Amino acid sequence: MNSQTKNQSMFQGPIVRQALRDSFKKLNPLIMMRNPVMFVVEVGTFITLLMLLMPYYFGVQDQMGYTIAVFVILFFTILFANFAEALAEGRGKAQADSLKKTKADTLAKRLNEKGEIEEVSSTELRKGDVVVVETGDLVPGDGEIIEGLASIDESAITGESAPVIKEAGGDFSSVTGGTKVVSDSIKVRITADPGESFLDKMISLVEGASRQKTPNELALNTLLITLTLIFLMVVVTLLPIAGYVGVQLQIATLIALLVCLIPTTIGGLLSAIGIAGMDRVTRFNVLAMSGKAVEAAGDINTMILDKTGTITFGNRMAAQFIPVGSSTETEARGAAVLSSLKDETPEGRSVIELAKSQGFTVDPAPYEQAEFIPFAAETRMSGMDVNGAVYRKGAVDSIQKYVQGLGGEIPADLKEKSDQIAGLGGTPLAISTGNQIVGLIYLKDTVKPGMKERFDELRKMGIKTIMCTGDNPLTAATIAKEAGVDDFIAESTPEDKIRVIRDEQAQGKLVAMTGDGTNDAPALAQADVGLAMNSGTIAAKEAANMVDLDSDPTKIIEVVSIGKQLLMTRGALTTFSIANDIAKYFAILPAMFTVAIPQMEALNFMNLNSPTSAILSALIFNAIIIPLLIPLAMKGIAYKPMPAAALLRRNLLIYGLGGVIAPFIGIKLIDLAVGLFV
Ligand SMILES: Nc1ncnc2c1ncn2[C@@H]1O[C@H](COP(=O)(O)OP(=O)(O)OP(=O)(O)O)[C@@H](O)[C@H]1O
Ligand SMILES: [K+]
Ligand SMILES: [Mg+2]
């Protein structure tokens, strides 16, 4: 989101004007049918229109003024509901427009089979193509860096102007189409066909094009339809009852009564509440793939985080070579470099760089034929086999098992020295040559600032945080303490992460997971809410149902608040709407019958001007309550962390009781105003 669109208020001129136009477009019955409550109002409006066009046929020629009034108020009721929805959609549409400008065609430098560059339009790129992107170029499509390192300006997507470093191998290798390389040059393998890019997805998300009703919304809709049918029957059965007591009920009055009784307030605002909730999430720079994910976030009990790149910055760098046993530092360094010679991960490259800074370089030529053992999350090791010699580096426990398997001994000082590194929150990597452990690499990483306060906030919301890391228990404990998570699981494989999530889910808990690596992808998919870091790999982003463009794992706090707010707002306005309708019933019914049954006057405790004025006032109140509640529907009712029961009690009191009282006051005031004209 770029920053101008992000800050747009919902009541900005162009958005309001567009929403007004859209309110009329949405009158189309085919669109209207998606909202059954408002569709009933539209049918009622249409019937009153017919009565106006053919008054003699309906026998209403002497009540034209009254019929016109009912028609106009009904018409505005629909427009107001349409306006609420159009306004909620407005900012997303504006955002989509500005993103579409980013999507302009760019020239791509594609490599052909001979390895020559040919210039093609970015729209011709397909999955698997390899392109070269140089300083000043726009990245022509989503992809993974396969060679090189570059700093990239991602502001077109994230709104953040500071460039980020992306490099081949590891968890920071994905690039997004539309971002700009500001220094160096990279080779990128394209991972998305045209029309399926991240930007395309983002556009259709903010535009609401792929918006689907959530299970909660569907359930509420069923309730609203049921209520509508019940009241339709109530109103229809009034006809014979009225006939029995000798009252001639007018069709316009019956329609007015029906519209007042059915839940038009929530029916008119329901989709606006959902859209506005999604929009609030987007404004926090989080892309939610579905409204369902946002609502699930509102009910989260447990949150699983990975350590490196999520809680820490993730640019783990080798800081020191430490010999163990009888080895020297030179031996340790030498073995570390050989084990990293072909390790393209940031950790591997940082080993080479550290050695270089210490004046030690290796000519790679003799190792052209060597067998490279790439790092894998399962083995937690990497290395190289050459001429019968084996060099490995990896998690201390993995290397220990590995050399023991080869009949090697564990140096006595290994534990003490690796614990020292872990005690500082660093990651110790053991280095081995053959079946001998020769030293340790100290990988340094830093906890992102402000984590502790943010995790405190999550605790107040009643959410338990668990850090799941592939790292050793001591490093994990140190980082867990520094970051302030509730619990941690060390030495976990990708399967362990899924198992933790499944265990929590089996206890009936809703689980959120944040992560950035390809090894996090299965867990991100398993979680109810999967929040991937935008800095992370493509696999992680595809598996997740949310992406944080700022790569801040604690953003889940905002998403949880918004989810809770969304659920609360919907509940509160439903309560208000139904309470409201009941109150209107008592305003209208006495008015309808006082003409024939004077005793009914006793029920007219509101002392309204006339039956006509009573009905019109109720109908006007019913209409204007919709625009009056638009700001509340859009902003959501305030959420303060407190127990669910207290929250429910508070909302029932405010919105239930308020819903009963408000119509009496509102209708009385409108009746006074109407009395001036009628
Ligand atoms: N390039 C590498 N070569 C050898 N071993 C590595 C390399 N990178 C990491 N390791 C070791 O493997 C362990 C697991 O690393 P990985 O990045 O997969 O962790 P993870 O499960 O994603 O957890 P987190 O990201 O929270 O650290 C690391 O703690 C480290 O000991
Ligand atoms: K109503
Ligand atoms: Mg990781």
Image: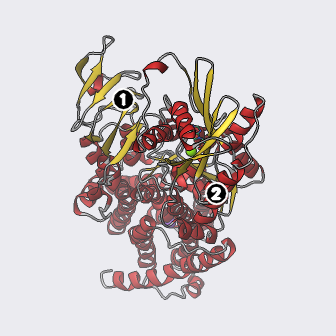
* Residue 510 in sight here: no
Q: CA distance from mark 2 to mark 1?
A: 40 Å
Query: Residue 83: image x %, image y %?
Result: 35, 59
Residue toward you, 569 or 403: 403
**Of the residues shown, which amino acid type is indicated by label 2?**
Gln
Local secondary structure at mark 1: strand
Where does residue 538 sit, x and y in percent of width and height?
47, 36
Tell me the residue that label 1 is attached to.
188
Q: Going 41% across and 21% down the picture, which residue do you hit?
A: 128
Identify the colour scheme used.
secondary structure
Quadrant assignment for ligand 1: top right
The residue identified by callout 2 is 420
Element assignment for label 2: helix
Task: Note whether 137 is above or below 655 in the view shown.
Answer: above
User: Against 435, is 460 above or below?
Assistant: below
Asked if ligand 1 lies within 8 A of label 2, the reply is no
**Nearer the camera: disc 2 or disc 1:** 2
Left or right, 550 with respect to 244, comes to: left
